[in-house]
Image (tube, coloured by chain):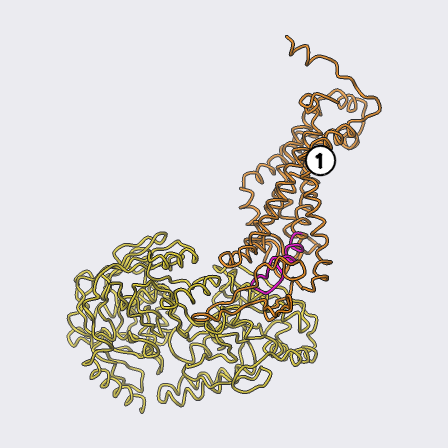
Amino acid sequence: MKRYLLAASAAALVTLGGLAPAWAEYQTAHRGGTMRLLARSSGGTLDPQINYTLQYWQIFQPIYDGLVAFKKADGAKGFEIVPDLAEALPAMSNDGKTLTFQLRKGIKFSTGQEVTVKDVVASFQRIFKVSSPTAGSFYAGIVGADKCLAEAASCTLDGGVVGDEAAGTITINLTAPDAEILSKLALPHASVLPADAPTQDVGSAPLPGTGAYMISAYDPNKGMTLSRNPNFKEWSADAQPDGYPDVVQYDFGLTEEAMVTAIQKGEADWMYDQPPTDRLVEIGTKYQDQVHISPLTAWWYAPLNVNLAPFDNVKARQAVAYAVDRNTLVNLFGGKVLAAPVCQVLPPNFPGHEPYCPYTKDPGTKWSAPDVEKAKQLVEESGTKGQKVTVVVEDTAVSRAIGVYLQSVLTDIGYVADVKPISSAIQFTYIQNSNNKVQMSVSQWYQDYPAASDFLNILFGCDSFHPGSDSSINMAGFCDKAIDKKMKDALALGVTDQAAADKMWAEIDKAVTDQAPAVPLFTPKHVDFVSKRTGNFLFNAQYYWIVTQSWVQ
Amino acid sequence: MSDTTLSTAPVPARKGRGPWARAARRLWQNRSAMVALGIFLLIVAACLAAPLYARWAGVDPFQSTLDAVLKIDGVDVPVMEQSTEGLGLGYTPLGPTWNLKHYFLGADNQGRDVLARMLYGGLNSLWISAAATVLTLILGTAMGLAAGFFGGLTDTVLSRILDVLWAFPIYLLAISLSIVTLSEGLKIGPFVIESGSLWLPVIIIGIVYIPYVARPIRGQVLALRQSEFVLAAINLGVPGGRILWRDILPNVATTLIVFVPLMMALNMLTESALSFLSIGVQPPDASWGTIIQDGQALLYTRPWVALAPGLAIAVSVMALNVFGDGLRDALDPRSKIRLGRD
């Protein structure tokens, strides 16, 4: 009950807040020009309900809208949920299982067609009809989702998403209260599209959106062009602000080295990929005014398979956690400016994060140094000394370097270790499949939305472990019934008392860290290298640089 | 008229000197071939000395030493240097010191001595290319001899197998085989080769080049099969195996010898390509290909990490090719006419 009051208060605050500008006034003098972006390759399909890449989630922001959105604001303010196509945050009833949205009037798709309740209902059905990658996880709690998951083609979400065209409302019924439902509805997979949008992956054919821009040209091998949506009229600067450049030209195919050079010469304004490590010194000294370094809620970690020797022994896992020198890894990533050591699952400044560092020279709240002697002792005690360990890493410069370093650490503490770099295109699914018998790997996890469950429950929950499947994100195969129950309790508690739930998540974080199903390595920072002419750089914690809020003239 | 006279003039034979000795003499007289051989042997010797060098320089080329600090001329020099200017972004490995005792070619991104890794990597590259050459020659010769001598169904089956191998682009086939075997290793009956073993690239490279050897050998054997001394042996009832071993194999031996350096050069390039793509030699083992890959990320600041192994490959392959050409000239009877003596 308390939660609903809070939600209502928040809605009132947001409505009032809407009267004031989200940040500095729109500066008309900077409007216009062509912004030139670069990326090594395209991000795949243009379907906002299917694409699951950070690259395109970022570029979808000025193109598509959902009922709610993450606020287009700088820093952690970007985690705030604001009404988008809905007039306000939803009214909740039925013990938090029913959300009712009032649809704004007068918003048009880029085709000129007005957004209707029918479009919203059809868009939710489409999530299942196109088998969106998160249909079974984020949206499975909607009434009728089970039938849609079983038979996607005939999905109606009967009783789950109900539209009232006369009243202009959309009611979403859940099977159980979900504290994170608004975050899930703010993701691109819940974008509102025309009701007649094809019910299969549209691939390279852009779908009409309601945002300030639309995709006017796309070739996955060459590039993408965004131009202004002629039917856009700003309704909320928090949710969908008008942009500065007239055109955004996103070109694919250059190497990172070439991208850096292009930006240095003023031939491009920004690169999606991180600058190569051997150019960091140069851009950090000669071009420091053009570099933006932003913290991320993410971690690099080394999952240890708890179902395979030697890491089926908790002492063996703890030994590795003690032995790994996080400072060395930070250096391999580019130095202290670009990363920070971590000891636990939840990243700093994240809901539920309470500093905890058991596997270090002086256990406490902060990592200080590796304790190799303790690690060797634990390996002896575990009786796993001399066993063979293979570390599977991505075939990228940083991952390979980390893999080679971990191999030398494992060798040092008594294992016979080797490292296997495999193509980035397959490594992520390869290490998930238990049939591949991966003992140890190196991976990264970036939040989908700001909730502790997005790390702990997703990466270490029993429901995330699917033996023999390429889609088993719990790579460690960790399933502790007691911890899992506590996660479910915390999820339920979050519906009524998020603060208490976050305390519970902090305890779960410690419990998982103690069991060491993964070695936390470091939390990365993001480097944005922009051209000299790029102004008004805003880094949103949820979707990173807000592309169209920067200007180029 | 005068040409005809010259070409038909009898060549005075030197008593007591066999064909092998004459070939060796011709090879010895080929200066470029001898220089190439010398360079190649120098590279081999340097690579064989890798463990000695690592011990003398006090470096472990397989261990990450990111925190190491060297004492050069009384000055502490970190192997990995954190940028302190501007935003303080990035770490740069030590560049070449041109001092054999201290990181002569500098460090890679793990803080390891590049020269030491070059020598160890060269050892692996040379070993793989040599072993793969032996494997190719054994299998290719066996297939070529059998197909050419026995003919009929044997020839048809073996030739079609060679056609299938030949149909694939060499690198595509090698990459495919490497990717398949890399995850699980290779299991043939009781024989198991681990995924990280150096034998995997040896076998893969050895197999993909079989048609290069088998085809010309088969052609030669088909011709030899019709020669009088072979027909005579067959008619006298000499067993086929004996004819192959005693009469045919010695006649194709020169071709096989010429193949050795040329195949080694090809194999070295293939091994480097596979290792560069992370599907050849697996870390922490090194080969020239893996070191080039390590150096790729440092091309802008520390180009020597990639350039040095690249040069080593280029020089070795060139040396092998020049020596191979010399060897062919020495063993080819036609070279007698070209050289105009002996």
Q: Quadrant of the N terminus of chain A?
A: bottom left
Q: On screen, A324 above or below B274?
A: below
**Residue A182 occupies quadrant:** bottom left
Instruction: Tell me where residue B264 appears, x and y as whole percent.
Output: 65, 42
Q: Nearer the viewer, residue B193 or B20?
A: B20
Q: On screen, A226 above or below B207?
A: below
Instruction: Tell me where residue A260 appears, x and y as whole percent.
Output: 40, 59
Kindly tell me whether residue B105 is visible in this rendering: yes
Residue at 54% x, 39% y: name it: B167
Region in magenta = B105-122
Q: Nearer the viewer, residue B77 or B292?
A: B77
Give the side of residue A235 with respect to residue A518, left or right.
Answer: left
Residue at 34% x, 78% y: name it: A79
State the residue position of label 1: B257
Residue at the right extreme of this rendering:
B16
Instruction: Tell me where residue A399 appears, x and y as whole percent.
Output: 52, 65
Q: Colour of chain A?
A: yellow
Q: Amino acid at mark 1?
A: Ile
Q: Which chain is orange?
A: B
